[in-house]
Amino acid sequence: LNHLLLTKIDTFSSPESNLYVDEPGMMTLIAAAMACVIASGFMSLFSIASDTLLYTFVFGRKLYADQLKDFIPTPLMHMLGNEIEDAASVALQAQPRSRLTRFSHAASKYKD
């Protein structure tokens, strides 16, 4: 997209313009590198935040098991299913493979 903008818009491709870009390929590489740096920072922060949410859930499950259903978000409750009632050590055991895909449970969960 960056390369198309630099080569097709007269503001950047016309040598008479004040914003003329002589090397659009190099500018595209620089823009891609900047995008990678910004995206890696965002993904690192996202990873830390999601880990924190899971650690908080495990901590709450350990200390407040009787009140867990009052405070757990609905999407997380649907994702965990019956594992909420299981003991923490049982829930972490490997489960047998099912025929469900990643999204097939959503269609059956929210049918009218």
Image: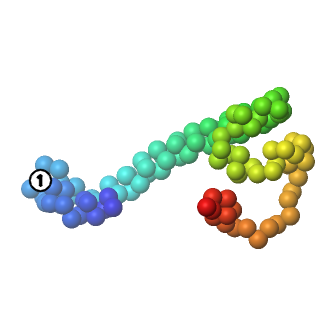
Report the front residue among 99 and 39: 99
Q: Is residue 106 left or right of residue 66?
A: left
What residue is drawn where x is 19% and y is 61%? 9
Residue 3 locus on image (x, y percent) = 31, 62
Residue furthest to the left in view is: 16
Report the front residue among 97 and 79: 79
Q: Is residue 94 left or right of residue 48?
A: right
What residue is drawn where x is 85% and y is 59%? 95
Residue 63 locus on image (x, y percent) = 83, 28
In this view, 62 is above or below 105:
above
Q: Is residue 58 left or right of residue 34?
A: right
Residue 13 locus on image (x, y percent) = 18, 60
Categorize mark 1 by other alpha carbons within 10 Å: few (<14), some (14-19), many (20+).
few
Q: Is residue 60 left or right of residue 86?
A: left
Residue 85 locus on image (x, y percent) = 84, 44
Q: Amino acid at mark 1?
A: Ser
- Picture quarter with the N terminus: bottom left
Residue furthest to the top in view is: 63
Would you identify the image quadrant in which residue 105 lies?
bottom right
Res. 103 visible in picture: no
Residue where numbered disc 1 is placed: 17
Say what secondary structure mark 1 lies in: loop
